[in-house]
């Protein structure tokens, strides 16, 4: 009997030492969460909730223990318990996991275009297959609200801002020359391939304190972290031929691209409005290397080089000169020769530690661009270099909150030759910034930031506060507000002659309302921009009126100061529907802007020549499954823009006709000798509309002539062949 007594004693002692834990797990509204995992950390003691959310289990643990509750889609729950009773009863309410589907997202002034974001607008193949974009990143952005098309100049023109007021940023690094070299009255493309990037973010104002030197907008491009297709690819079209090779292992990958282009065959088929003496010819290459240095560390290195040549006859306002007279007295034709060499390299390193609570984003880049240019036999060479380094640290806090801080330094070297005189300058530019995102609740969030900058050339500092707020008004809707100050160095052409100028400034105020539901997006945004400290140029002699020179490529020679000012105000509408009709994706945008400025050579407050009041885009794409073909159609409308008429008493009050453009594109998935291929074609200005972008007058003011597109109706065909069995392009990408 003795062993039996011992067993009974042990059983009684053990039973007395156990603690019963029971209770119920619900969401914050009290609804039961069946299948939730409830356990004591560091032990095997636990249970799973039943259909009513109830749980019950015993433990031998004494004193204190930590109860943990986990359920998919909800925030983990932990609570320290004092196990000094026979039974502990608990009611646990779990908070829904913070995601972009149930949490307010700060959206005012920004259009995200990333596969990873809920606000996805344009993916890389979206850009390529959008009619009217010409497979150009900035061309696609011009079809989003807030931007407009200015056909005779390159750049992003956003909400009444000039092309110089927008910056292109790759992996946090400013790109010094994102477009091919500027030539008179020709709109140049961007230099970068859309497939380099995993996503884009187009800001129409009120952007983060991380970025500066842009009064209107920043276009953020983030390069891919890994190659998508191993093997060799070949691209052929009417303008160029290229080879691309991708190779990837578990830890590293490399992508190499080489190409040669000559536009003479294309121009032979598409009638040109420009007299080409040597059609643009170019050669280039790029190399991308990626290395996973650890489970969290990633090093990316990108480098590219291009060399291009062209020669053309350019019409210059005037009635006399050494050039060839244009029939009808429109002006003088002068020969323009250009040889451009451009190099850009950037490297970034990202990492995290402390269980992902600390994030590092660092980078270094160098760019060099040289234009050996002759205008009517006279040298007009240009050279610019930019070296920059950047470090950003982010601390992730509980409840989706975060704190970000960092800095960047730039070394800029510019040289310009004009009229036999050489100008040069150097600028050491530095910036520091800090920003925090605060989620007061799932419905209310804010972003507060500040940025300070210093320019050695100006010998001045600035301080720019930034603020964004967002409030979730419903399950699928929210309102956002953004405000802040933005600074930018004056055009360096002014600084060659006057380094005593101050930063130019713009103050932004943006209010946004957005609804996203079932693959449909509606968005309305209103804005106000106040411009201050703009550069004014005085070209007249003392006591005489200023002279206005319409040549956009002239070298400024007048006295300058920062007494300029202005405003821009208006609203944007955006609607996108990807669900109503199966396979059809379309969006509609309308932008209205009212803007006036007193700046540059302007004599009075007036609407700038690059700004139009109304801009409309209708974009539609349809996938035909049986044909394995995607087709797209785009209609773009731009209302008339101001131009200078020397015979009119009122300054800059004449308007050009409205610009209409209908474009078509199609792409087909197929196989060529067993190799996957994509065939594509595009037609721009399908209706052959005789669009006019601006008018100019001869020096005597007697003759007006139109500046229009490089060609009226144009077309383009090509193909991409993937010489790899693993290569794939998904239907949804087209």
Image (cartoon, rainbow, N blue to C red):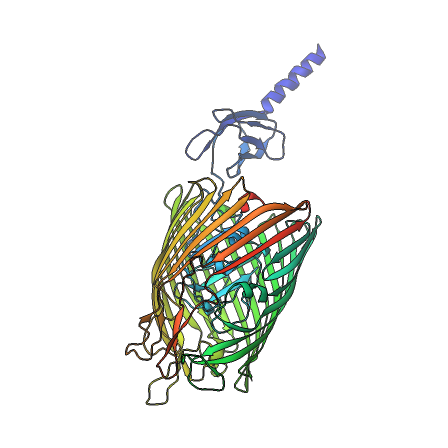
Q: Quadrant of the N terminus?
A: top right
Hey, which quadrant is residue 701 in on the image? bottom left
Nearer the observer, 493 or 256: 256
Relative to 226, does residue 59 appear above or below in the rendering?
A: above
Q: Residue at x 53, y 35 (%)?
A: 72
Q: Residue at x 28, y 76 (%)?
A: 650
Relative to 213, does residue 496 appear above or below in the rendering?
A: below
Spot the residue most to the bottom. 542
Left or right: 360 in relation to 562? right
Left or right: 407 in relation to 673? left
Residue 726 can be seen, yes or no: no
Q: Position of residue 719 (x, y in %)?
A: 60, 53
Nearer the observer, 275 or 15: 275
Relative to 54, does residue 112 appear above or below in the rendering?
A: below
Spot the residue most to the left. 649
Nearer the observer, 284 or 144: 284
Hey, which quadrant is residue 477 in on the image? top left
Q: Position of residue 405 (x, y in %)?
A: 53, 60
Hey, which quadrant is residue 628 in on the image? top right
Residue 39 can be seen, yes or no: yes
Nearer the observer, 259 or 196: 259
Left or right: 294 in relation to 669? right
Q: Position of residue 488 (x, y in %)?
A: 46, 70
Total tally of numbered discs in the picture: 0
Q: Position of residue 523 (x, y in %)?
A: 38, 50
């Amino acid at each position: 009997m003795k062993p039996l007594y011992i067993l009974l004693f042990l059983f009684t002692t053990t039973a007395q030492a156990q603690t019963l834990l029971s209770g119920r797990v619900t969401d914050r509204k009290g609804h039961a969460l069946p299948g939730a995992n409830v356990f004591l950390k560091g032990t095997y003691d636990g249970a799973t909730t039943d259909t009513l959310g109830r749980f019950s289990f015993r433990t031998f643990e004494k004193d204190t223990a930590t109860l943990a509750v986990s359920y998919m889609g909800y925030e983990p729950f932990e609570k320290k318990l004092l196990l000094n009773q026979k039974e502990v009863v608990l009611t646990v309410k779990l908070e829904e996991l913070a995601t972009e589907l149930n949490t307010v997202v700060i959206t005012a002034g920004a259009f995200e275009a990333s596969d990873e974001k809920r606000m996805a607008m344009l993916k890389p193949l979206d850009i390529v297959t959008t009619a009217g974009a010409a497979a150009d990143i900035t061309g696609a952005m011009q079809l989003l609200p807030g931007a407009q098309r200015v056909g005779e100049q390159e750049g992003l023109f956003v909400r009444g801002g000039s092309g110089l007021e927008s910056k292109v940023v790759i992996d946090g690094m400013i790109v010094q020359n994102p477009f091919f070299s500027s030539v008179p009255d020709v709109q140049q493309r961007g230099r970068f391939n859309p497939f380099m990037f995993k996503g884009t973010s187009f800001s129409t104002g009120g952007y983060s304190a991380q970025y500066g030197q842009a009064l209107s907008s920043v276009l953020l491009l983030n390069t891919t972290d890994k190659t998508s297709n191993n093997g060799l690819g070949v691209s052929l079209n009417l303008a160029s031929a290229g080879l691309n090779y991708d190779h990837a292992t578990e830890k590293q990958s490399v992508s190499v691209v080489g190409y040669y282009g000559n536009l003479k065959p294309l121009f032979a088929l598409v009638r040109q409005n420009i007299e080409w003496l040597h059609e643009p010819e170019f050669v280039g290459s790029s190399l991308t290397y990626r290395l996973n240095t650890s489970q969290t560390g990633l090093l990316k290195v990108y480098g590219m080089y291009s060399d291009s040549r062209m020669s053309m006859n350019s019409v210059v306002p005037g009635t006399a000169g050494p050039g060839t007279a244009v029939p009808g007295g429109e002006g003088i034709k002068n020969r323009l020769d250009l040889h451009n060499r451009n190099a850009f390299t950037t490297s970034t390193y990202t990492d995290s530690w402390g269980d992902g609570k600390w994030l590092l984003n660092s980078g270094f880049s160098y760019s060099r661009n040289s234009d050996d240019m002759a205008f009517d036999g006279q040298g007009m060479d240009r050279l610019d270099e930019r070296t920059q380094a950047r470090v950003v640290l982010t601390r992730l806090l509980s409840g989706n909150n975060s704190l970000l801080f960092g800095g960047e330094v730039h070394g800029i070297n510019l040289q310009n030759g004009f009229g036999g005189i050489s100008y040069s300058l150097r600028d050491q530019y530095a910036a520091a910034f800090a920003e925090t995102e605060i989620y007061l609740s799932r419905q209310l969030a804010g972003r507060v930031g500040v940025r300070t900058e210093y320019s050695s050339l100006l010998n001045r500092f600035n301080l720019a506060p930034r603020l964004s707020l967002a409030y979730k008004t419903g399950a699928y809707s929210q309102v956002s507000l953004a405000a802040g100050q933005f600074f930018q160095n004056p055009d360096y052409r002014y600084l060659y002659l006057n380094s005593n100028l101050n930063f130019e400034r713009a103050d932004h105020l943006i209010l946004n309302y957005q609804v996203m539901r079932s693959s449909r997006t509606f968005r309305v945004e209103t804005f106000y921009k106040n411009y201050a400290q703009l550069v004014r140029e005085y070209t007249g002699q003392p006591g005489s009126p200023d002279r206005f020179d319409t040549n956009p490529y002239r070298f400024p020679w007048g006295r300058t100061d920062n007494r300029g000012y202005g405003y821009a105000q208006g609203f944007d509408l955006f609607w996108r529907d990807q669900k109503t009709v199966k396979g059809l994706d379309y969006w509609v945008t309308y932008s209205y802007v009212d803007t006036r400025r007193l700046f540059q050579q302007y004599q009075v407050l007036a609407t700038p020549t690059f700004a139009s009041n109304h801009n409309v885009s209708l974009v539609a794409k349809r996938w035909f499954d049986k044909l394995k073909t995607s087709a797209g159609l785009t209609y773009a409308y731009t209302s008339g823009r101001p131009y200078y008429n020397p015979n009119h008493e009122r300054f800059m009050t004449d308007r050009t006709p409205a610009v209409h453009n209908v474009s078509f594109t199609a792409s087909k998935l197929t196989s060529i000798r067993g190799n996957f291929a994509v065939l594509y074609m595009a037609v721009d200005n399908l209706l052959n509309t005789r669009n006019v972008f601006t008018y100019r007058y001869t020096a005597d003011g007697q003759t007006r002539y139109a500046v229009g597109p490089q060609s009226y109706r144009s077309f383009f065909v090509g193909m991409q062949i993937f010489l790899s069995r693993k290569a794939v392009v998904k239907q949804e990408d087209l």
